[in-house]
Every structure is written in C-alpha cells, then in structure tokens.
Amino acid sequence: MKKGLILGVTFAAALALVAGPALSEDIQVVRPDDDAAIAELDPGVIAFEEAPTHIFLTREESEKAIARQALARRTANMTYHGGKIMQSSTTKAIFWGTSWNTNAGDKITGMDSWYAGFGGSAYAGTNTEYSGTNGFVGTGSTYQGYVIDPTAASGGGNTGAILAEVCKVITNPDPLGNGYYAVYTDVPRGNAGYCAWHSAGSCSGVPVQFAFFWKLDGDPGCDPGDTSGLHSQGLAAIANVSGHELAEAMTDPANPGAWYDSSGAENGDKCAWTFGGPLVTFSNGSRWKIQGEWSNKAFTAGTGYPNSSGQRGCIGGL
Ligand SMILES: [Zn+2]
C-alpha cells in the first residue's frame, strides 16, 4: 500500500495503532515523522529516501481495501510511475530478538531454505513482466545467509529503528543497491493492522531495500492457512508475507515508485490473501503456501485467478 494513497491511511497512522484499535476509514492523512528517531540512532550513517513505506494489511483490512478499490470503478491494472525496479536481489535474513537463539523452532531453518530457493523460481517469475528505468525485473536472487541479533527487537512502529538494525548488522550492503534485508522480529503483532512492511533507505550512502516482519505465531489475522504439514504455522505465516514483500520490493522499490494501481496497491497488495494453488515450489524443491501477485497481462487476457474482489489478475507462480 502506498502511503497516503489508499484509504487515506498512512504508515504513520497505522503505526499509531500498534497498541490501538483496528484500522478505520477516518484516519487522518499525516506524514510519518521518523527524522527524530533516525537522528537519535546514528545520524550520517543511515538515511531514508523519500520513499513510502508499504504496509501489508491483515487479511481483514486487506479485503476491505480491495473491495473499496473495486467499487471505485477504477481500472484494475497497475500503472508505471517512472522509477526503477530491481533486476535482481541480494538477500539476507536478520533474526532480531532475544528468543531466536533458544526458541526459533523451524523458522530460521525454514526461511533459510525459502531465500535459498526463491532465485530462479517460477514464483519469482510472477514479477518479470514489469520494467523500469533500469530494465526488467528478473528472477535472479543471491542469498547471503542469515544473521541472528540477540538484542531486544523493536516492533514495526518505527521505520528508522528497523533501518538502523539493518545498517548495524549489514556492514557491507550490496554496493549495486540490490540488497534486500528482511528483519524478522520475535515481537507479536498485537493490535497493529499490518503483518509486515517494506521500505527503502541507505546505509553509509549505499541504497538498501528492507522489510519488517512481526512474529506471526498464533496470529489468525496474518495466517495463510497452510495445511501441508511441512511447516509450523508461524513459519508458514512469515513465508507467505515474505513473498508479498519481496515481490513488491522488486516491482516498486524506491522513490519515484514503479508499479502500483490508482489506489496505491502494489502487485502483492492486489492479490493479498488469495492463492493460485495449495503450494508453490521453489528452485531448491522447498514448497510453500504463498499468495500470488498481480499481473496486468493476465488481467487483460482474463487468464489470472481472482483476487478477493473477483478481479482475474493474479498469477501464482506455482
Ligand atoms: Zn504490500
């Protein structure tokens, strides 16, 4: 979701709800003000672009937003907004929190397999019809492994805190700017109206993509309902939202933006909580229940599967 464009709800407004009520339609449009937080953390080392932070709404809030967009009778397809895309990605997973060394369950090993298998997968191919000033989105992805930071994690309410964590842990971000750093915390979502988000910034002048994830164990609002028995529920949940965030980072990574629709929804948002089949198979053979992504081509051709508003523009990358 693009900040300030959908529902009149901004990231900052959503953040204010971390300990508050569910999202509502009458939230005022305000700009996030993370500058103070950044300055406290490490001025001169990290910096935000003027890039929006894109939140991934819970199932309930997402369905409301997509239904509202459909009612507005706007064109369903996404349009190009002049920016760059990610031709490839160099990924690293950061497990931040005091419990990861002792209570990770299958989540670290599982996400390790997830990122190792994403590159070259048919699922990664759901993004490749989109291009920007620097070419087309590709399926190439180099996984650099994971790191555990056992200090206490913040929640998702402060984008600057997550960027600071990325810059602390990733001492040499990909110099080409293709680095995508996924921060998995052990903090439960509580009443926040979103499951995860992605944003952009820089560490010592090097552009980075990064994403934030709540701990989603036992969280029905962010649960894809994976009944395969291959993964714990908590792993299945972060695996699903990880697909959404990486797809959006690839197709709409920075400011100016690249691909999103008239209501600000990116390719993951438009197909949130809908699935092209029971499981997708990654290039390393690992299998996951992950939502599909929006395809302008499939919608135009009428060949996609329907999103939660019945618009047939989703492709699953099975
Ligand atoms: Zn999203």
Image (cartoon, grey):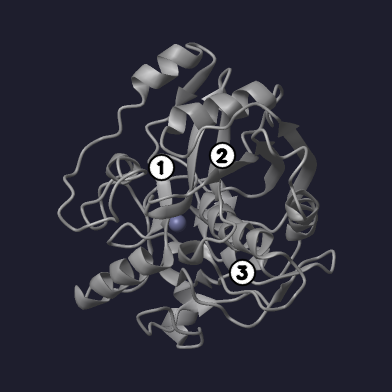
Q: Percent x, y for residue 274?
A: 50, 76
As drawn, the label of residue 106 is none
Which label's residue is closer to the chain start, 3 or 2? 2
Closer-to-camera residue (296/263): 263
Indicate left or right for 251 with 282 as reference. left
Given the image, on which type of amino acid does mark 2 rest? Phe
What residue is pinned by disc 3?
Answer: 290
Q: CA distance from mark 3 to mark 1?
A: 22 Å
Q: Percent x, y for residue 289?
A: 65, 72
Closer-to-camera residue (225/117): 225
Question: 68 above or below 15?
Answer: below
Indicate left or right for 178 with 305 as reference. right
Which label's residue is closer to the chain start, 3 or 1? 1
What residue is pinned by disc 2?
Answer: 210
Q: Percent x, y for residue 44?
A: 50, 11
Q: In this orientation, does residue 308 appear?
A: yes
At horizontal 79% and vertical 40% (from top left) the residue drawn is: 144
Closer-to-camera residue (152/245): 152
